Image: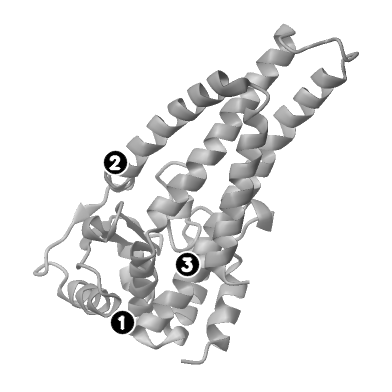
Amino acid sequence: MDNRLKTFLLLAVLTAVALGIGQLFGPTGFYIALFIVLVINVAMYFFSDKLALRMYRAQEVSEKQEPVLHRLVAEIAQKAHIPKPKVYIIPSVTPNAFATGRNPKHGVVAFTTGIMSLLTERELKGVIAHEIAHIKNRDILITTIAATVAGLISYLATMAQWMAILGGFDRDDGGSGMIQLLVMAILAPIIAIIIKMAVSRAREFYADKRGAEFINDPQALASALEKLERGVEQRPLQHGPQGGESLFIVNPFSGKSVMKWLSTHPPTEERVKKLRAMRI
């Protein structure tokens, strides 16, 4: 299935779950929850780039400081038909990179010192193309939408739990309604998290594909991902909060996920396999 279609379907399911839960609370309860979650995530949408750069101690670098990096970023941004993103360096030996910014006009690409010393210029070009694809695809917006709906579901589920505890549900049905409410309160957030992670994985696959198309060289990114997988296993990120791993091109805290369906990234071997099979 095309990853754009898959993303749309996943967001549709996530929205349907939220609306289904919302019916239990009536218009007032649902809209209050929606407003609270929306305000939080809109703020994150506009300020997530600054927060991410601060969390990982990233510093902007000039063309004089990193001429090769700036040249490659400018070249690929031109091919992608977007403004050249700002370039940042993260002081970490963990080899990794991420993109942020709410739209292409505010794009930022950040690279650790570890990735700069690990990859060849060709492999680095593949990574830059992947990150610029995220900016081009407006993935910050898409993941914000997913986070908003998932957050709404979690908020409503918490309300449902308190309703059950405080007896705020109609008991004329012999208690079956309360049981249904509790089951929904437990299962809905789990479903939301699974779908949110699936959206993240779909966007990674799509960024791999689009990035490879920008530079007409899928093998460059495939080789880079293999090196990054090994590099992160040897030198995982030592600072930075858990929860920010979805930003990076590979999970910076662990090379592999125990449960694929709860991972923010697809397995590296699957990504490499798809890239190796591309014909451009």
**Hey, which quadrant is residue 191 in on the image?**
top right
Label 1, secondary structure: give it. helix
Amino acid type at image mark 2:
Phe
Quick check: 215 above or below 182?
Answer: below
Q: Looking at the image, which residue is at 61% across and 74% down?
A: 269
Label 2, secondary structure: give it. helix
Q: CA distance from mark 3 to mark 1?
A: 17 Å
Residue 24: x and y in percent read 68, 24
Label 3, secondary structure: give it. helix
Decide which of 164, 35 is in the foreground and name it. 35
Q: Which mark is residue 231?
A: 3
Q: Is residue 25 left or right of residue 117?
A: right
Quick check: 109 above or below 268?
Answer: above
Residue 126: x and y in percent read 38, 78
Q: Quadrant of the N terminus?
A: bottom right
Whichever of callouts 3 and 1 sits on the residue coming sooner in the sequence is 1
Amino acid type at image mark 3:
Gly
